[in-house]
Image (cartoon, grey):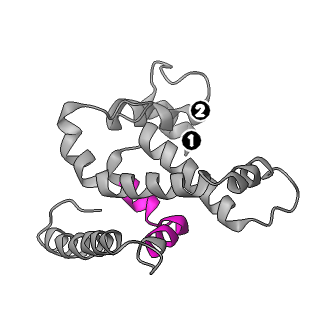
Amino acid sequence: WQWYCWSTFCPDGVCGARPWGWYSHVQHKYWGVGLLSYYTVKQVPNFLLASPIIYVTGSALYAHFSQPHNVRSLLRLCLPRPHDYATILAAYTTFLFAVGLLFAHIQILPRLLLTCPPIYTHLGHLLSPASTPTTRITTLTYLISWQLIGCIMFSNFYPWT
């Protein structure tokens, strides 16, 4: 399969000498995938759709890594038995966040990030009694409106998520 795709999509050796290099060539040529290559003016609506999850993820990661003991835990991730699972999940979320913002299409960023538990723990913290009433009301309004708008947009075949 690799050889067939390489000979079909890379007839003049534009993909290099490696038969498995055809996929990165197709991504770059037909899908526009690459470092910051998706940042164009015509993609502004897609960035606006993804902006809430970008903000929530950024604030969740900032809240987690702004505590000094979590930064030390991050530096110890290379040890054989890390026990701080919240920091491991935050590091995973940071990796997805960085790859999604820098290399991937912005439409898949909400799908990638909504699978990460640190976002939900952060939203749960914002809804806890320890938060201010304004923070709780703002967070609850955001979550309810996101769900309602998403149901309306998705059922009418508009891009959502």
**Mark 1 crowd level (few <14, some 14–19, many ≥20, 10 Å Cα):** few
Measured from the top left, where is residue 19 in percent x and y? 59, 32
* Front-lying residue, 41 or 62: 62
Is 111 included in the stretch rendered in magenta? yes
Give, as a three-letter code, the residue at label 1: Gln
- The residue depicted at 32 percent of the width and 70 percent of the height is 139
Task: Kindly check if marks 2 and 1 are in contact, taking CB atoms under 8 A apart as contact.
Answer: yes
Q: Is residue 137 above or below residue 28?
A: below
Residue 49, how many percent across, how many down?
A: 24, 54
- Outermost residue, right direction? 80
Task: Identify the residue at horizontal 23%, vertical 49% (top origin).
Answer: 48
Q: CA distance from mark 2 to mark 1?
A: 6 Å
Residue 109: mark: none
Residue holding disc 2: 19
Main SS category, magenta section: helix
Residue wearing tag 1:
2
User: What are the residue bounds of the magenta stretch?
Assistant: 108-124
